[in-house]
Amino acid sequence: PRRRRGLSPLLEFMRTTPAAAIVPAAVILFGIHERTNVAIVVFGSLWPVLLNTASARASMAPIRLEVAQSMRLSRMQTMRKIILPSLIPEIAVGVRVAAPICFIITLLVDFLVATGGLGYLLVQSQQSFDARSAFALLAFIGILGCVINIVLGLGEGVALRRWPPMAVSDH
């Protein structure tokens, strides 16, 4: 609770700062590089996963940690066997929320930095009044978004295939 109170204002400030707002500062500080673009995308899409995970951890039943203590699990074993399995559903939700944000920010960085990519091509098509290319790119972006959603759904299904844990049968 003490760390949460201390870090909360900084995290709230960073969370509410739009990724588009940090693009100019990041380019000035770090230059136009692929790493800068990736850092901006990570910054913008990190928050749903981080906040969902933190919220799930804060609301986790204390009995789970008591079980780990009674079993004399090490800190790493507790993390691997108790905490992480308890957080997986909320982490999956955070990833599902973050994926479209990540995609949007990637396109936005392409728009603003103009170093290539689908966003850059879309802006070029729009500026040259090439409606056919612009609409084709929009359709491709929409299809790509659907594919990303399907792949994440499949990944979530694999990650949660044993969630909730199977009840022990009375037989």
Image (spheres, rainbow, N blue to C red):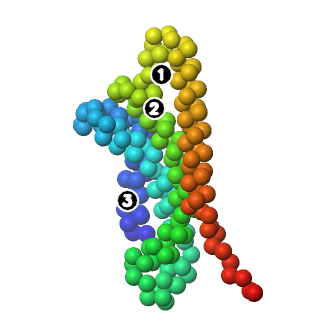
Q: Is 40 rendered above or below residue 128?
A: below
Label number found at residue 107: 2
Residue 79 in the image: state x and y as whole percent. 44, 73
User: Is label 1 in a helix, a strand or a loop?
Assistant: helix
> Neighbour class for label 2 at 10 Å: few (<14), some, many (≥20)?
many
Q: Is 71 rendered above or below residue 59?
A: below
Q: Amino acid at mark 3?
A: Leu
In the rendered image, which residue does mark 3 sit on?
A: 7
Residue 161 visible, this angle: yes
Q: Amino acid at mark 1?
A: Leu
The residue sitting at 53% across, 66% down in the picture is: 87
Q: Amino acid at mark 2?
A: Leu
The residue sitting at 49% across, 38% down in the picture is: 103
| Residue lying farthest to the right in this orientation | 171
Question: Residue 11 or 149: which is nearer the viewer?
Answer: 149
Q: Earlier in the sequence, mark 2 or mark 3?
A: 3
In the rendered image, which residue does mark 1 sit on?
A: 122
User: Is label 2 in a helix, a strand or a loop?
Assistant: helix
Q: Dividing the image into 4 quarters, which one contains the C terminus?
A: bottom right
The reply to whether dot 1 and dot 2 touch (C-beta < 8 Å) is: yes
Residue 140 in the image: state x and y as whole percent. 55, 28
**Gap between marks 2 and 3 measured at Cα:** 30 Å
Q: Earlier in the sequence, mark 3 or mark 1?
A: 3
Residue 135 in the image: state x and y as whole percent. 57, 19
Label number found at residue 94: none
Point out the frontmost of discs 2 and 3. 2
Question: Residue 51 or 140: which is nearer the viewer?
Answer: 140
**Gap between marks 1 and 2 measured at Cα:** 9 Å
